[in-house]
Amino acid sequence: MTAFDRTLRSIDDLVDAGFAAPDARASLEEVASRYAVAITPAMARLIDSTDSADPIARQFVPIADELVEDPVERPDPIDDHGHSPVPGLVHRYPDRVLLKLVHTCPVYCRFCFRREMVGPGKADAIGGEELDRMIAHIAARPAIWEAIVTGGDPFVLSPRRVADVTARLAAIPHLKVVRWHTRVPVVAPDLVTPELAAALRAPGLSTWVAIHANHPREFTAEAEAACTLLADAGVTLVSQTVLLAGVNDDADVLADLMRRFVENRIKPYYLHHPDLAPGTGHMRVDISRGQALMRELNRKVSGLCRPTYVLDVPGGAGKVSIGPAHAAPSEDGWTIETAAGERVAYPPAPASGRVRRRRRPR
């Protein structure tokens, strides 16, 4: 069995695979004792161990920089705990809830904002009584229109378990949309089966899957086949990407990634600014850099390929768009910045708020 025939889960595995230096073993063991490590064969095969700046390795291979914490970082950056009326359920917005069914993933990203909560030994999967309480919470609140199923990665669940969750959510009359958040189609595409795709759907329920990928190289032939399977099964696909220093903080890389999403019938949805998770400062970029990248991206790609650049406000205040502003008030109306970076004038609306039509003479 070669190193890439199974998931790499230890520092010894990484050293044997050539992804970590033997003399770094002690510091990396300290990182692994705090934050989970797992690299699937699909991702391990993509890593170029001769490139010290490989963007795939940077996402999954631990480094000693993760032991450096900034005072602004926090173990629960967006205060999931403070918005959890029942265990495993986050109710931050009036019309939607988040269900954290599992606390494990096929891979563990080095920038994960829930890194203090996920991984072996961190928490158990949600059991029957806990799921009952989640379902009861949703059923008792008619304002809840959407349930977002996450974790961990919910696609590590068996199709039977996924089908059960889907059926229970579909039985709530006022719940119309279920959205599953996952990296599985990219990092472990063999887990995407016709049985899983069928389990995601139920009559009366609109099913969406948000697929997380951060670099165009992640779209292997196997990943594309997994996305095709889901799309052909009638599941609507959207994307999630995290803006990461040394991975995709380049407009050409982002443009290539967003085009790959669209080519695979995945609508670019969110480009996340990194959260203030412990030990992730080396992967964060400044917001001004993100806005500059979005300006450049908008000049390069079709409107189909443009995600919304968002920040989850620390402390649990929710997501806000932080993309560049292309309209600013001026003395004579508005100044508009074009995709090419030029500034043009745009007139204000009439004082009455609408245009008065002139009567035609009879």
Image: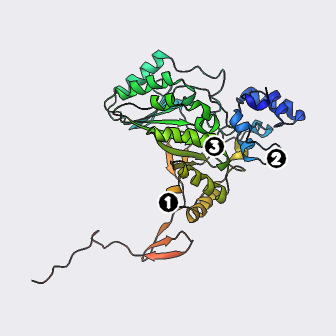
Q: Is residue 153 above or below residue 225?
A: above
Foreground tag (3 vs 1): 3
Q: Secondary structure at mark 3?
A: helix
Query: Which mark sits nearer the N-terminus, 1 or 2?
Result: 2
Q: Which residue is mark 1?
A: 303
Please rate how many residues cluster around mark 1, counting C-alpha atoms within 10 Å: few if below 14, some from 14 to 19, many from 20.
few
Q: Are marks 2 and 3 in contact (CB under 8 Å)?
A: no
Query: Could you say where residue 332 lies in the image, as x and y percent from the top left?
Result: 42, 77
Give the CA separation, mark 2 to mark 3.
25 Å
The one nearer the camera, 233 or 127, is 233
Which residue is tagged 3? 221
Mark 2 or mark 3: whose residue is earlier in sequence = 2
Q: Which residue is mark 2?
A: 52
- The CA distance from mark 1 to mark 2 is 34 Å
Residue 287 seen in this snapshot: no
Secondary structure of the residue carrying tag 2 is loop
Front one among 284 and 220:
220
- Residue farthest left in this picture: 362
Nearest the viewer among 159 and 94 is 159
Rendering quarter of residue 200? top left
Q: CA distance from mark 3 to mark 1?
A: 25 Å
Image location of residue 329, percent across then percent down:
45, 70
Q: Is residue 45 visible?
A: yes
Q: Amino acid at mark 3?
A: Ala
Q: Secondary structure at mark 1?
A: helix
Three-letter residue code for mark 2? Ser
- Nearer to us: label 2 or label 3: 3
Residue contact between numbered discs 1 and 2, judged by CB atoms under 8 Å? no
* Left or right: where 300 falls relative to 133: right
Residue furthest right in the image: 23
